[in-house]
Image (tube, helix red, strand yellow):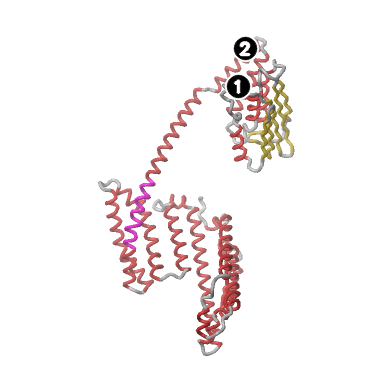
Amino acid sequence: MNDLTLKNFVDKPIHFSKVEFWAATTIFVFAVLSLLTADSPNKVFFDEAGISFYYHQNYFFPQLIRYTLLYLSFLVLNFLVVPKLIEKKALFLNILLIVVLFLVMGIAIGTIDTYTKNYLFTRFGTQQQTYEHIFQNSFHHAFWLLLMFGFYCVIKYSAVYLLTNSEAIQSKYRMITRDGLAAFVLWMVSMFLLLIVDADVEIVVFWGAAGPCGILLYCYSFYDLIPNSLSKKRPFIAYLLKAVVILIISVIPISLIAMLLTHDEDAAFGISLFNVFFQLFITVPLSWVLFKRHIRGSEEVYVLKNELGRSNANLDFLRSQINPHFLFNTLNTLYGTALQENSERTAQGIQMLGDMMRFMLHENHQQKILLAREIEYMRNYIALQSLRTSTSPDIVIQTKIEDVVAETFIAPMLLIPFVENAFKHGISLKHKSWIRVTLYYEQDKLFFDVYNSTHAKQEQDPEKDKSGVGLENVRQRLALLYPEKHELVIRETLEEFFVHLTLQL
């Protein structure tokens, strides 16, 4: 993709939106079902306060309302508000909607907590103080939920944007790889989960530092450290020493950042030191293994390209040996000679053969051709085959092929295999044989029928157990080119082989 705008991405992730919707719906359903079996974590506080606890009033229905509110708020924000904000449409209205949702969530959560945390009324001097405490916490919680949703949106749009444009980004910044971008996305998701589950500050800070450090070290190893170490006598040792130097240098800046976040010098230094060992024993060897695998894969691709190049060269050489102009000139000479000798049937056969060869050379390689040309080729084929059977009274060939004047296109060589199969297996010079071919076109539909007689094959016939010329190939082509737009019926009896094809063009 050349357009690296975020708006360009927003218009495309239709399938991702479906995944989001069903994931959110699944989580909502499981959360509601969990209410049927789970006990309230606040029941013990009711007992300590000497207040009666009612499961439905103080837990089930309030939590059901809470889950429903969160689910609906997510749908509104994720599928309506945020896309409009990114597209810069109705900014004021959507910002106002966010504010309204914040107020509704704060009030609703506060009201719900007056039931689920009813025991708090015994801990404060007045009801007013209790309500102030509950609703302050509810609005704090609503604000935290909006922050988490904002973090989720940043992760989602950044992740798919980076992965979608990975090739363009990598071409612009050579050090950045698709694997590095994927690892960065996973790191953002993991940070989001750590914040959601309210993990310890030390764990969040460590992973917040170790993740980006590992990704940067991995990308730099691929870009510079490992390639420059391969020429050394002991490449892995040389690479390892360089990585150790970089990790030692990183101790001080990581310690300072951790100290600002944890306000604890010992914890900050411990996080920085643990990061060194984490990168040394996990990121460094993993980068080496993945780079070696990448090299092997590149070598295999190089070998395959060379082999393919040789194959194409050989094919081109073989094609060059068969000069179409030479063949057509020769056929024209034979055609003229046959006319001079009054061999009209021979001349007719040569002319039809030349027309068929032109079709094979010039049109057969195209993805779609006119239906009229496909029909013309089939008629030439039938006429050419009829020349060798016209002297046999026991062989009957009947055709009812309608002319198609409409500019309708079809994949080439889709019909002829059935006719070839009929002539190959349906004609016997010793027994009565017949072939009937009908074709007509109506309202963008092609109707094609082929009947042929069947004959018992000799035991020594190499084609005895074969089902026909290219029939399986035609089945596969129909499935690929015309999925759910065709009907193919093939039946065989002791006396007749029948093929019916209906094709929506």
Residue 377 seen in render: no
Q: What kind of residue is marked 2?
A: Thr
Q: Which residue lies at the image location 62% right of the left edge and 38% below the top edge?
A: 478
Residue of label 1: 458
Whether residue 53 is situated above or below residue 425 in the rendered picture: below
Question: In the rendered image of this protein, does residue 271 appear above or below residue 380?
Answer: below
Farthest top residue in view: 341
Q: In terms of secondary structure, what is the magenta stretch mainly?
A: helix
Question: Where residue 337 sits: x, y (%)?
Answer: 62, 12
The answer to which of 460 and 2 lies nearer the viewer is: 460
Q: Residue furthest front?
A: 459
Q: Which mark is residue 337?
A: 2
Comparing 420 with 330, the one in front is: 420
Secondary element at tag 1: loop
Q: Is residue 224 left or right of residue 75?
A: left
Q: Above or below — where is 66 with respect to 368?
A: below
Q: Position of residue 272 (x, y in %)?
A: 33, 66
